[in-house]
Image (cartoon, rainbow, N blue to C red):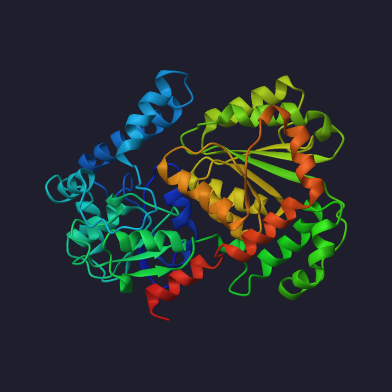
Amino acid sequence: MPAQEGSRRAWVVSVDMGYGHQRAAYPLNEIANERIITANNDQIISFKEKNIWEWSRIGYETVSRLKSIPGIGPFIFGLYDRLQAIAPFYPFKVDYRPTATVRRTKKLIEKWGLCSSLIDYVKKESLPFIATHFIPALAADYLGMQRVYCVITDTDMNRVWVSKNPAESRINYLTPSRHASMRLRQYGVPEDRITLTGFPLPRENIGGREQTILKKDLLERLPVLDPNNRFISAYRETIKKYLGDVREKSKRPVTLCYMVGGAGAQTEIGITIVRSLKKKIEQGKVRVMLVAGTRLDVASYFKQELGAMNCDCEGRSGVKVVYGLDKRAYFAAFNKELHEVDIIWTKPSEMSFYTALGLPIIIAPPVGAHEKFNREWLEHIGSGFLQEDPRYVDHWLFYVLESGRYAEAAWHGFMNAPSLGTYNIEDVVFGK
């Protein structure tokens, strides 16, 4: 439900481009004034602005899908990726200079009026402005708003996320990782306008500041991920200190969740996984969840291929397809299913931060420079594994499972990745 009348209200603004920016906004719905506004297609946005955004979205999704085409695909994606490239993190150096993309974004806002209808609308009430995409945040700043907050949705970001003159900007950045905070300082953002909050995770999977739901789910998950009791027996007292008593054995099979990105890339991997695991699925040793998001074409493809393999896609056969008609319905459905997920297999998108729920991540090939940094972050904190050949997942998945390493990775995610981002963001915005 939208925020009630009172002091804890803010304009929450996202962008419909992939899933990351809207997934970050979804947990902030309780403080959103009126609703979460989508800057590129909300009813208040002008026709001219919608057209600018739409061409950008089509270009992004087309290039993302082209990457999988042999030969020309990687070449075209490489050209596009240069526009969003991020400099190597080492050696540390300060780079204040605005790039051509920074100047072009400023021109789109000030000369062509991008986000002007949005800013005109939100100025009717003097409330904090929280954006999960850089363009609405920059527009609010360039067009004179005072309390502007930008939620960073990756572990690193291109210079375009920061204004032309960062020292004079009013944007307060809310970051998901120490790495992102350090990069913003390299771009010239003053330290007092950078706060490490963590990525905003869904309230229904956290259970408040005491993390009651998160801890309950992780207690159920650890025995599934440690069938030989190797990790649990070695760390039982530590687990008890943070979560409570943990069982040595679980009666349910391991649930593997494969997720397709917003552009529909890497869809075929999901069916390859089911084909490889089919015998073990029939034996009740593993369940597979295929997440199509809002891509009805992907959901239809999954169902068609599963039907050809005589697999029921409603979960009764151990395979389930999860999707929604819109982003809000999809996020709600996925978050509900997430309570019983044990391992997430995904490209290193914003879903990388869901490792904080105590979930090991199998990392599919990254799409874009920012996802390469997300992959490195997952490996750095010890909760991510580079995917092996999907055709042989029936071998390597259980090899790692029996070693207890997935349980260890789940623990590293819980301990090393911030999980209270949603609540921390509220504290920063409302001055707690």
Q: Is residue 45 left or right of residue 303?
A: left
Q: Position of residue 309 (x, y in %)?
A: 74, 22
Closer to the camera in the image, 357 or 97 = 97
Determine whether 180 is above or below 41 in the image: below
In the rendered image, the quadrant that contains the C terminus is bottom left
Residue situated furthest front in the rendering: 91
Q: Position of residue 171 (x, y in %)?
A: 28, 65
Q: Residue visible at 47% across and 66% down?
A: 30
Determine whether 9 is above or below 376 in the image: below
Q: Quadrant of residue 36 in the image?
A: bottom left
Q: Is residue 429 left or right of residue 395?
A: left
Q: Position of residue 210 (x, y in %)?
A: 63, 75
Report how many numbered discs are placed on residues in the image.
0
Q: Residue visible at 36% across and 48% down?
A: 15
Q: Residue visible at 68% across and 55% down?
A: 409
Closer to the camera in the image, 48 or 24 = 24
Q: Position of residue 429 (x, y in %)?
A: 38, 73
Closer to the camera in the image, 234 or 13 = 234
Residue situated furthest bottom in the rendering: 432
- Residue 161 appears in the figure: yes
Q: Is residue 78 left or right of residue 294?
A: left
- Residue 33 appears in the figure: no
